[in-house]
Amino acid sequence: MGSEPKLSVLFTSDEIEAAVNRLAAEIRRDYLNKNPILIAVLKGSFIFLADLIRRLDFPLEIEFAQLSSYERGTESSGKIKVVQDVQSNIKGRHALVIEDIIDTGFTAAFFLDHLRQKKPASLKLCSLTDKPSRTQVEVNIDYLGLTVPDKFIVGYGIDWDEKFRNLPDIYVLEQ
Ligand code: IMP
Ligand code: MG
């Protein structure tokens, strides 16, 4: 066993909840009568999706996709693959991608291009967090929860090496 990584709170569960409530209100306003398909990118967005949709009181569907982004460690490789694609047909549907974090933007840009080829009626992006200081590919985030500094974060579904997803708050991992 190595030494325990040091975690410091960045956003408390109350702050996260306030951001999710605000996003739910914005999404409700825009999708109320559209029966959208919310496409959550695994694994990091599963808690965010679960909290978000319980605040949406209108018809919607959910889908999951899994992408491989980082080959190892914490640096983006820019090489992305679809490991598990959406199962239902999104052609002509209003699709809303649900992400945990936009870092360099490679993953989201790739996935939006991938989904656009399936000809949805509309395609937008909702991300719980964004790290603007790290942008390499400009991606428009239609619904953004929280802006994070140039730090590695964990908790609320977001991992480091598959660990810390279960923490209710969001922490900076001091390395
Ligand atoms: P991007 O392609 O560089 O935008 O990276 C997006 C993906 O990298 C996210 O979906 C996460 O899986 C991962 N990632 C980027 N930054 C962090 C972080 O601070 N903590 C945990 N995962 C991260
Ligand atoms: Mg990840």
Image: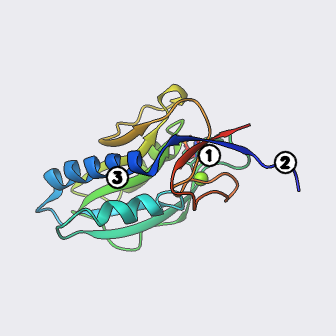
Nearer-N-terminus badge (2/1): 2
Label 1: which secondary element: loop
Mark 2–mark 3 Cα distance, whole angstroms, equals 45 Å
Q: Is residue 127 left or right of residue 7?
A: left
Q: Residue at x 47, y 29 (%)?
A: 132
Q: Are marks 2 and 3 in contact (CB under 8 Å)?
A: no
Question: Residue 116: which disc?
Answer: 3
Q: Residue at x 21, y 56 (%)?
A: 121
Helix, strand or loop under label 3: helix
Q: Which mark is residue 79?
A: 1
Q: Secondary structure at mark 2?
A: loop
Direction bottom: furthest residue: 87
Estimate the x, y position of residue 2 in percent, counting from the top left. 87, 51
Q: Which residue is mark 2?
A: 3
Q: Is mark 2 within 8 Å of ligand 1?
A: no
Q: Nearer the viewer, residue 75 or 11?
A: 11
